Amino acid sequence: MSHLGEPFCVQVSRILSVQPGDILRLMGQTEIFLKDLPFVKECRLISREGYRSVTFWRVEIDHVPISWKEESIFDLRNGTVSFRALEGDLRVLEGVWKLTECPQGGTEVWIEAKVEIGIPAVFEKAVGGMIVEKIRKFFETVLDSMEERIGFERYRRKNEKSSRISGFGVIGHPYNYQHFLKNLHLLKLDFKAPSPEFLTKVFDLTPSYISYGVQEFRDSAGKTTRGAFIACNIIPEMLTVDIRKTVAKVVESCKVAERHGFGIVALGGFTSIAGEKYGEEFLKQIHIPVTTGNTLTAALAVEGVLKAARLMETDISKAKVAVIGGAGDIGSACARVMAFSAKEVTIVSRSPANLRKMEKEIKSIRHAKFHGTSDAVKAVRDADIVIGAASSPHSLLELRHFKNGAIVCDVGFPKNIVYGDVDRGDILVFAGGICSIPCEFQTGLEIGLPSTRMLYGCFSEAIVLALEERYENFSWGKGHITREKMDEILELAQKHGFSLAPFFWSGGIITDDEVRAIGTGLRAGV
């Protein structure tokens, strides 16, 4: 009668977005692509003959060292790799990798292993489960490394014709907890919310996922691309609690896009702060090209302001412009462009250093007079044009703060101005940075737009770049948006049937005639 414990079974599976042959080729080079992993202390090829290889492994997982000599047999026809430990710390370590091509694309990798530790049963009962969990973690980490290597190889060749990347991913998130609840109710009409504490934790633990896949996005000329809306479970308040954790969630969302082989991903809403604050450090964690979409957003915001001014017959050359968040990426771009034609530009920022920087930039244009302040209410008091572009989790202004005849363009997400019905007929308030798009776009979630033929500029920029097959970090960092780049992306957008969206606010669409009527009423003294 044996006093040794019974064998344990380890099962791990993952869908990787490549063909089985690609994975088999990678598995034939494990000693190369795994050798730099922190837990792999030694991994070397001993011999290779035909479809049989022998390797030596020495790993340390959570401070537990395990070593063995392994034989692997490759069966290319059936897509399997059988392995067994010829000798080592474990009495038995054997199993098989099974690769199955998925109908929806990609390959399911199934690993099944039998593990027998080979120590007396009384000890195995105490530590066997722990050791087996280390083996499971080993296989999971190997799959993680494979996924990383596949992403690296795929995007290293992104500009080659043989590249298998295409399309776009757009990353969005709820603008607050109530917005999250609203989407849950839309997904399940009879949803009864548990306690906020429980639901907040569930929200925090939920990984990024594709809420809607776009099989075909068709432009006005008939050219198509594919894509997806990727839900990133963050809300703006999380940035003040743990920005590193929030950025990690954005990286996770980008990895979702990588797994699906998209050519570019847009960081929508507050996810763009990952790029603005961490720049190159963020890019080192991913392979896919990214864009904040801020260039097209800023261009559309300015286009909307200029259109409103024409309709209301507001003379830009005599106008005082206030930009809330005017030192941010979108706000500073809008301020620089408006400074070429406006009489005065007031920048609102909490940072004195950023105000000094913007003062230098605006004064270098040698046209508009510059003002800087941290007081948003004071800044808009006599402003003819207000652009709200601050990254704030809460509203900063109310309708009563604006002067008679003001044009107010709110680019914020969440909104800089309290979102609600406008009970004043003497001002125009509209959501800026929005596109009309050439075909419907579903997200699977409510994103605050009145039509599926309208989309945020940040998302639209990624789609335009995907249609152009320009897989590059088009909008990246902070303060790099130029007038020339704004003109360039607008021209590309128009080429594919994207245009400035109709004016709208919480009450719905605002027609051009309604905008004209505001101007007419002002001139008539109504």
Image: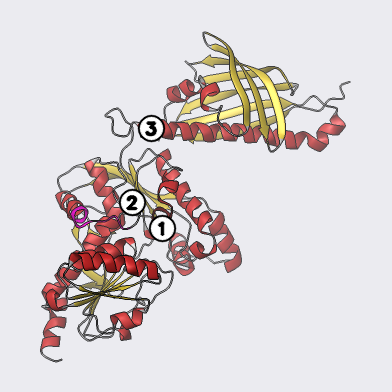
In the shown orientation, is residue 308 left or right of residue 209? left
Name the residue at 22% across, 85% down.
425
Q: CA distance from mark 2 to mark 1?
A: 10 Å
* Residue 106 visible in image: no
**Where residue 76 sits in the image (x, y, percent)?**
48, 16
Q: Is residue 417 above or below residue 500?
A: below
Residue that carries the numbered disc 1 in the rendered image: 273
The quadrant where residue 106 appears: top left
Residue 14 rendering spot, x and y as whole percentages: 52, 35
Q: Give the spatial CA distance, label 3 vs label 1.
A: 26 Å
Q: Which quadrant would the C terminus be assigned to in this image?
A: bottom left
Give the answer, above or below, for where 415 lies relative to 68.
Answer: below
Read off the residue under disc 3: 154
Q: Cβ–Cβ below 8 Å for labels 2 and 1?
A: no
Would residue 62 appear left or right of 13 to someone viewing this image?
A: right
Give, as a single range, the part of the protein colored magenta: 479-486
